[in-house]
């Protein structure tokens, strides 16, 4: 059941019963104010820890930087749906700003592949979230294999998965700007504050996508943990939502991708029968533990659909 059937059917049903949900549509520019502060904060912390021992930098990145980096990743996510600023161009520009502390230019590539993910949810060859067949076989169901996958997730998720998508990110002025601005930021940080500052930012980026409670959102969103679940998209209702613009409310987000995360709790209150009682997560740490330890859960425990000829050749 792809998003065209599952989430679209839910969307139409909710709007029939609760048409006031449309009042939640649109951007939330307050996100930009806080995001700008987080960007500045990351650079300040990087400067402060630049001359500290490596273990201090590591702890700072895991305990502070990963959460900040995750928040900025969510801001880029919101920008991909044009939910932060008015208009497409301003959202693209602000997404690049939010991407600066990551040191890795990913705002425009994420926007491209994430929108394909929404349009072709679960379609191999079009949805970059889908694990590759060799990836499933290599890491398997063993605890060691899945733990190793968590360590490598930042690479597989951001580099390898997009390579299987037939519709590559277009090389345009926005992509070039993203590379120049973020790449230039990394060089400037290294020259002004030293390698320690760059290491802090790089580790923050790594942990936010890897073996960290923030990185577990990749497991929580579409992997099926409950064999009785009737949904290919699951939500997380826990404390990290407070610092991630409710990014954990993923079922709600896929139902209405034009509602900013700050208003998703209102959506849930307006249509409780569509969200209460469904399979969900309450702890990212427990989710990570279950993924590694439960041999019944593998990377392909999700709805995976074949690519159709029409989708391969639009």
Image (tube, helix red, strand yellow):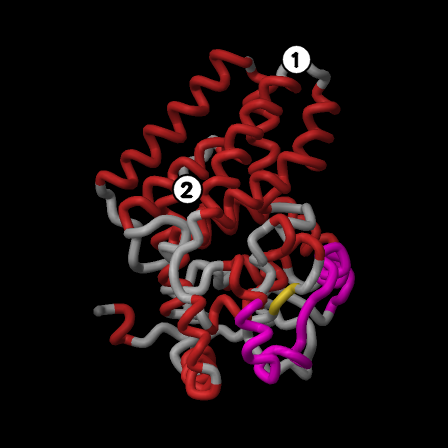
Residue 134 seen from this side: no
Q: Secondary structure at mark 2?
A: loop
Q: Position of residue 122 (x, y in %)?
A: 46, 71
Q: Quadrant of the C terminus?
A: bottom left
Q: Residues within 10 Å of mark 1 (few under 14, many from 20)?
A: some
Tell me where the magenta segment starts and ends, as one range: 266-295
| Residue 264 figure quarter | bottom right
Q: Residue at x 48, y 60 (%)?
A: 129
Residues 213 and 223: in front is 213
Alpha-carbon distance for marks 1 and 2? Answer: 28 Å
Q: Position of residue 29 (x, y in %)?
A: 42, 48
Tag shown at residue 51: 1
As displayed, is residue 66 above or below residue 87?
above
Q: Position of residue 31 (x, y in %)?
A: 48, 47
Residue 42 seen from this side: yes
Residue 151 relative to residue 260: left or right: right
Q: Position of residue 147 (x, y in %)?
A: 70, 51
Q: Residues within 10 Å of mark 2 (few under 14, many from 20)?
A: many
Q: Main secondary structure of the magenta part?
A: helix
As displayed, is residue 196 above or below residue 272?
above
State yes or no: residue 288 in magenta.
yes
Residues 134 and 107: in front is 107
| Residue 222 figure quarter | bottom right
As displayed, is residue 226 above or below residue 286?
below
Q: Residue at x 53, y 34 (%)?
A: 37
Q: Which residue is mark 2?
A: 106
Residue 258 relative to residue 41: left or right: left
Q: Secondary structure at mark 1?
A: loop
């Amino acid at each position: 059941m792809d998003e065209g059937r599952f989430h679209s059917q839910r969307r139409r049903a909710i709007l029939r019963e609760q048409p006031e949900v449309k009042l939640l549509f649109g951007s939330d520019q307050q996100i930009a104010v806080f995001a700008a502060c987080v960007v500045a904060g990351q650079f300040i912390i990087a400067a402060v820890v630049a001359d500290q021992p490596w273990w201090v930098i590591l702890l700072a990145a895991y305990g502070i930087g990963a959460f900040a980096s995750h928040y900025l990743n969510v801001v880029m996510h919101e920008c991909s749906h044009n939910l932060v600023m008015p208009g497409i161009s301003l959202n693209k520009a602000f997404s690049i700003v939010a991407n600066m502390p990551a040191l890795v230019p990913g705002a425009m590539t994420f926007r491209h592949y994430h929108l394909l993910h929404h349009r072709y949810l679960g379609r191999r060859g079009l949805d970059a979230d889908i694990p590759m067949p060799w990836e499933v076989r290599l890491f398997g169901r063993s605890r060691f294999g899945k733990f190793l996958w968590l360590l490598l997730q930042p690479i597989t998720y951001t580099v390898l998965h997009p390579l299987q998508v037939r519709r590559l990110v277009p090389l345009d002025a926005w992509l070039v700007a993203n590379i120049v601005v973020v790449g230039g930021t990394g060089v400037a940080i290294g020259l002004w504050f030293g390698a320690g500052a760059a290491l802090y930012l790089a580790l923050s980026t790594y942990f936010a996508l890897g073996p960290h409670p923030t990185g577990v959102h990749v497991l929580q969103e579409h992997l099926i943990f409950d064999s009785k679940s009737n949904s290919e998209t699951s939500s997380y209702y826990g404390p990290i939502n407070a610092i991630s613009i409710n990014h954990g409310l993923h079922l709600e987000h896929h139902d209405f991708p034009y509602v900013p995360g700050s208003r998703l709790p209102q959506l849930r209150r307006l249509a409780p029968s569509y969200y209460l009682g469904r399979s969900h997560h309450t702890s990212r740490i427990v989710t990570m533990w279950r993924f590694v330890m439960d041999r019944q859960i593998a990377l392909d425990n999700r709805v995976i659909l074949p690519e159709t000829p029409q989708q391969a050749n639009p």
